[in-house]
Image (cartoon, rainbow, N blue to C red):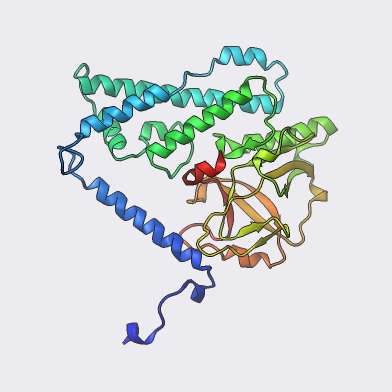
Amino acid sequence: YIDDSLPAESPYLYGLHPNAEIGVLTQTSEKLFRTLLEMQPRDGGVGEGGGMTREEKVRAVLEDILERLPEPFDMAELLGKAEERTPYQVVSLQECERMNILTQEIRRSLRELNFGLKGELTMTSEMENLQNAIFLDIVPDSWTKRAYPSMSGLALWFTDLLARIKELEAWSVDFILPSVVWLAGFFNPQSFLTAIMQTMARRNEWPLDSMCLHCDITKKNREDFSSPPREGAYIHGLFMEGARWDPQVGLIVDARLKELTPTMPVIFIRAIPVDKQENRNVYQCPVYKTRQRGLTYVWTFNLKTKEKPSKWTLAVPKPRSPGISLIWLLESLNNVL
């Protein structure tokens, strides 16, 4: 009787956009497929035709990663070039150092597993866990402990890693701030945002605790910029979840149907005194590293809106933190680079 009498559940009944239901169903489907993959037998061929065995597939992925993984950064050389130690240079050096720690662990663990697969070393539980992770397209635990939050599978995660290394290589050539910074490419993006405030504080002799970040959303893409701003930085690589930014009117507006995470234009970030911050007609939009939100919180940007902030706070359903947000998604890496 209940099924026949009550209307079908709809996001509208809860004050949500239809995209909210699409997101939930997509996550449920991905979880189902992941479970089915993990239930595959660990012995025998990958497919029914008896093609590549499990070990052959793992070895192919292993060799591909080792072949494409760049050499570590020469920290002694970089420290010699970064003589001024500006806040931006310090961030770059820290990022290069953390990248070395991660890539060295990747190289060490893969070489060890390779010896184990050849029979030259006894397979340990750590090596077996690494082998299982590679076969299931999961980022190994020993890598994630040294990396950054991510919801991607191993293949896309490694593609993103190479993109991050490429960005750091370009920046560390002369330590000149890039014309547009890929904020999502940092291990610690908070340190870069803090460096923006530190640079302005030193220039104007302002106390750091009396400053905040102000963001202006431009109408341009990364390719439209050829040099960094005189103060602050241009950043890119952010996506909005729960709504979208309309560059024509310069406001947050309702999301389009089936457009779950629209790309944000380049954002101009600069430091200003706290007493000059505009708090009217703005939504305090949190920035997260992943769609899981939670502990991946980075910062809060004030975005202009004509609607009440409460509307955007209810735009994303549980179990994630409520409200629209800015995130960077590895799933949309091609749109970032």
Q: Tell me where residue 238 appears, x and y as whole percent.
A: 59, 46
Question: The C terminus is located in which quarter?
Answer: top right
Q: Looking at the image, is 9 positioned above or below residue 296?
A: below
Describe residue 2's horizontal placement relative to residue 83 as left or right. Answer: left
Q: Looking at the image, is 325 positioned above or below residue 77?
A: below
Residue at image point 27% right, 31% down: 58
Q: Tell me where residue 242 appears, x and y as whole percent.
A: 56, 60
Q: Tell me where residue 79 appears, x and y as whole percent.
A: 62, 15
Please state which of residues 48 and 290 is positioned toward the viewer in this rendering: 48
Q: Residue furthest right?
A: 204
Please state which of residues 198 and 282 is positioned toward the viewer in this rendering: 282
Q: Looking at the image, is 19 positioned above or below residue 181?
A: below
Residue at image point 57% right, 66% down: 314
Image quadrant of residue 87? top right
Image quadrant of residue 117? top left
Q: Tell me where residue 171 appears, x and y as whole percent.
A: 63, 25
Please state which of residues 72 and 195 is positioned toward the viewer in this rendering: 72
Q: How many marks?
A: 0
